[in-house]
Amino acid sequence: MPKENLTPRERIAKARINLLTDYPFYGNIAMKLVPREVSDQEAEAFGIHTMAVDMYGNLIYNPHWVTAQTDTIMKAGIAHEVMHVCLKHLVRIGTRKPMTWNIAVDATVNEVLSHTFKIPNEWVRIQQMAGKCGEEIYDWIIKNAKTYQMPSSGGFDSHIFGEDEGGTSDGKSGNGQCNGSKNSPFFKEGQQPFDTARAVREAYNFAKSQGKLPAGIDRLFADILNPQLDWKDVLRKYIVQVIPHDFSYTRPSKKSYSCGYYMPMIKREHIELCIGVDSSGSISEEEYAEFLTEILAMCRQFECLKATVIVCDAAVHEVMEIDENFDPYSVKGRGYGGTNSQPVYDWLEENKGLEQVKLLVYFTDGFINIPNKEYMFPTLWIVTKNGRTDEVDKMENATVIQIPKNGTGKDND
């Protein structure tokens, strides 16, 4: 069907379908967006002369611009909006200047898209900042304000900025206009913020199954596609699994009895958690305290749980029980000789009996010798932020988790 016989809404639909066929990663996410056509009054009020997107996944477009574009530009334009949503550019503005932030994140997105699409010459690109995130490009623009000429148009599209959880956005769009209620004038009752993580994972699997995954997507969305396990959650799951329990009707559950039901009480047996701590001297006191504070909190949470801390480098130097008087700041690096985990396993065999050990949690920087034999009980290795995992990864019947360097993680692009 000739282009002139299609309405702007139909052209948007056609472009999304073509994306789904030709570039399934972008197309899969584009199909989840909600097209919203602006009137001339809205276009003027919110500065939407091409396209825009908000944190709720509303794909806003100016019908006059859509009518004038080729199919190629339409596909690139929608993919451009998809990337703004996926990279959370709309909620990462903070207290930055909207116009400058618009330019910075447009440059980031256009650089990514240039590996897949033919980007129009008028779309902003900053070659010397290729591969950098929006925050880095924004700072570069500010520092080079005297020599860098920002595009007078302010970038390809308009941005409807909003607030993430705990965010500090000023709630302004690309041209500085207030967005109204719910951080967007295009918000519809019942809409929820766009689920970026889920959309990216689904699109990634969809495109990969067709062998059409865009270059660099694995790196770009590494935090979403390969989320960092939280060692605290893993340890809690281990604890729940290894604590033996039984049921008894002799004493009914108080919660069920008060509701008129006679349900059995869960009887949990006491279990001892064994904690190995690497004291070779390359772990900071703050890291020791953070780790042991969490262990202390878990012991308080599970009344049937006891914990024994075994401090070791090349030999066991100290053994302590975690009780109400335990001080998480009492363990400090010693820096004696090398680091070997075998003495901890030997101590457990001599003093606890290996059949009694249900789980060993070992806190280390990873520069450590692992045992030369396999043990029946599992070992959970917690490796420090700047540690190495290649050695402890070799051990059988073990789980290795490294504490992320940025703690909670953050977007990198």
Image (cartoon, rainbow, N blue to C red):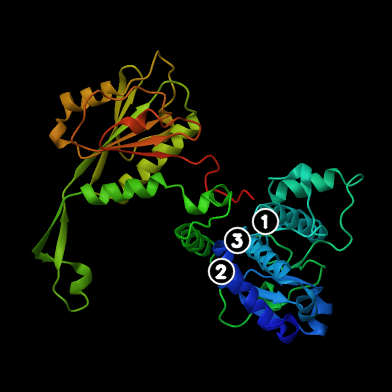
Mark 2 / mark 1, whichever is N-terminal: 2
Farthest residue to the left: give it: 250
Residue 86: give its label.
Answer: 3
Q: Mark 3: few, some, or many residues within 10 Å (few <14, many ≥20)?
A: many
Front disc: 1 or 3: 1
> Mark 3 or mark 2, which has the lower sequence index?
2
Which residue position is annotated with label 1?
113
Give, as a three-letter code, the residue at label 2: Leu
| Three-letter amino acid code at the position of disc 1 | Leu
* Residue visible at 91% across and 44% down in the picture: 147
Is 396 placed above or below 264 here? above
Q: Position of residue 160 (x, y in %)?
A: 72, 69
Mark seen at residue 126 = none
On the picture, is 351 further left or further right than 117? left
State the CA–CA distance, disc 1 to disc 3: 13 Å
Residue 279 appears at what percent x and percent y? 40, 23
Q: CA distance from mark 3 to mark 2?
A: 16 Å
